[in-house]
Every structure is written in C-alpha cells, then in structure tokens.
Image (tube, rainbow, N blue to C red):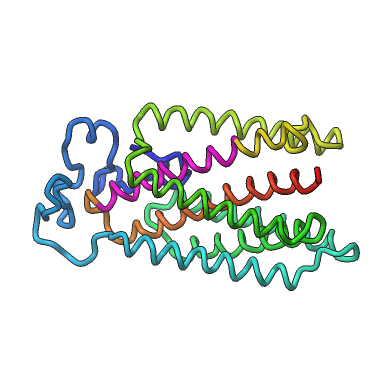
Amino acid sequence: MRSSNPVFSRRGFSRDNGAYAGFDAQHQQAGTNPYATNPYATDPATGMPQAPARTNAMTIDDVVSRTAMTLGVLVVTATLSWVLLPVDAANINKSYGIAIGAALVAFVFAIIQSFKAKASPGLILAYAAFEGVFLGVLSAATSTYFGAGVVIQAVMGTMCVFAAVLFAYKMRWIRVTRRFYGFVMAAALGFILLMLANTLFAVFGGGDGLGFRSGGLGLLFGAIGVILGACFLALDFKQVEDGIAYGAPREEAWLAAFALTMTLVWIYVEMLRIFQILSGDD
C-alpha cells in the first residue's frame, strides 16, 4: 500500500530491483511477506523472525526518535525565526521574503530526498530547519495581526488531529485499503489544483483570488484540507506499520519521520487558516 505522502509514494519502504521489496496491495492480498528474503523480516501473523534476528531492523522506537528529532529541529528554527525576524511594519517585507525563500529551499530539499536512493538524515533535518523558518514567520505574523491565541489553537488542533487519527487507526476504525488510497489521492490532487488556481488569481487579479481561502468558502476548504491531512496520517501510519512488520531496514525510519513531519506541517497550516478566518469574523 503506497502512501499519498510524496516520500512514501516515491519509495514506500522499498528497493526497486534491490535487496528489499516494497509492500503493496498485491502482496497484502496474497498474504505473502515481501521481505521474505530480508534477514530482518518477521512473520506478521506470529511476530516471530523468519530468519536469524539482527539489530538493524526498523522499530517503532526508531520512528518515534527520528520524528522527535525532525520536529525538534523544526520547532527550534520556528522559534528562532519568530524572535529574530520581526513582522512589524518596518520589517515585514524583509521577513516575508526570508520566509518565502526558506519555504522554497525546504521544497527543493524535499524533492531531492524524494528521489534519493537512500534516506539522508542531513537533508531531512535541513528540510525541517528551513520549513521551521517559514512556519515561524507565518506564525509570528498570525500572532501579530490575528492574536496569539490563533497560533495556540492551531497547534492544539494539529495535536488533536494527530492523536485522534492515531487512536482511530489503532482501534481499526480506519482501514487503509486500495480504494481509500485512491480516493485520498484523487481528492488531494483536486484540492491542490484548486488552491494553485486560487493563488494565481490572487497574484494576478488581486484580492482573495477565487475566494477559496477566505470567508465561508475558506472555512470549508480549510476543513477539507484538515480532513485530507488526517487521511495522509492514516496512510503514513499504515506505511510505518507495514515497514516494521515486514522488516524494513532501520534507515527507513528517517523517511517515516520526514513524511510524518510534512503531513503535520500540512495540517498545521490548514488549522492556522481556519482560525485566522474565525478570528477575523469576531
């Protein structure tokens, strides 16, 4: 099962024509272990090793620690950019310019990592650092012009979505299937295209573009964005679960951290937009 996340959809804990075979729906339906020749693989039915166990198979602790490191770097750089890049009238253009530049650099790092044969911790942490600069300035501007409570609400909302999806996934209320994956991918593509169109109309036509990011429509599309982010989380959880069960190598935990970080950033930005609109309506 491929995740909708750009990292997982590119590689999916797999080696094309390599020592490790990726997990996909065909293997899932056949009930076979795609890592059967992998010395780190376990039988998902029994949890017992299919070959002599080694110490460098990916575990949930690896995923948690790498994700904590990646998010930690993001939070630190976001905090520093909030403090060091003021968004008052005299400095806002400069701060916005730096933030946009950082976002573009983070995007380039994400693309490079997506096409690399192996996970690169340096690239992943660099992505988190530059993404943090962008989010720090965005959050500082939101706090200045909409109120500090908006940022706190967005952070809490992101955490609640993560916890709720994790709980629902562990309880098997959410079942990631090929149909689920196809629906999420189609919805995400349509959402992204609409947001790009809205941005282009805003840049060249002025105002709010097509109105998809303000007012009632803004709230609707913000909610859709959060729901899509929740679906991405479910797909990412499934990919991590399969990688652990089928013996992915430990280095793949960095890809899990990378993917989860991108999904959480997506949800946070959508939450921030929702609470900005709600605050502006007060």
Q: Nearer the viewer, residue 71 or 24?
A: 71
Report the predominant secondary structure element of the magenta stretch. helix
Report if residue 19 is visible in the image.
Answer: no
At 38% from the left edge and 45% from the top edge, which residue is drawn?
11
Q: How many marks?
A: 0
Q: Nearer the viewer, residue 188 or 166?
A: 166
From the viewer's perspective, is 166 left or right of 157?
A: left
x, y percent for residue 224: 59, 35
Report if residue 127 is visible in the image.
Answer: yes
From the viewer's perspective, is 197 left or right of 14?
A: right
The outermost residue toward the front is 282
Start-end of magenta stretch: 224-244
x, y percent for residue 24: 29, 36
- 183 shown above or below 121: above
Is-magenta flag for residue 233?
yes
x, y percent for residue 117: 38, 52
At 43% from the left edge and 52% from the top edge, which residue is drawn?
116
From the viewer's perspective, is 35 left or right of 161?
A: left
Is-magenta flag for residue 123?
no
x, y percent for residue 103: 65, 55
At 38% from the left edge and 26% from the top edge, which residue is drawn?
179
Q: Quadrant of residue 254?
A: bottom left
At 59% from the left edge and 28% from the top edge, which residue is drawn?
190
Tell me the quarter of the image containing the N terminus. top left
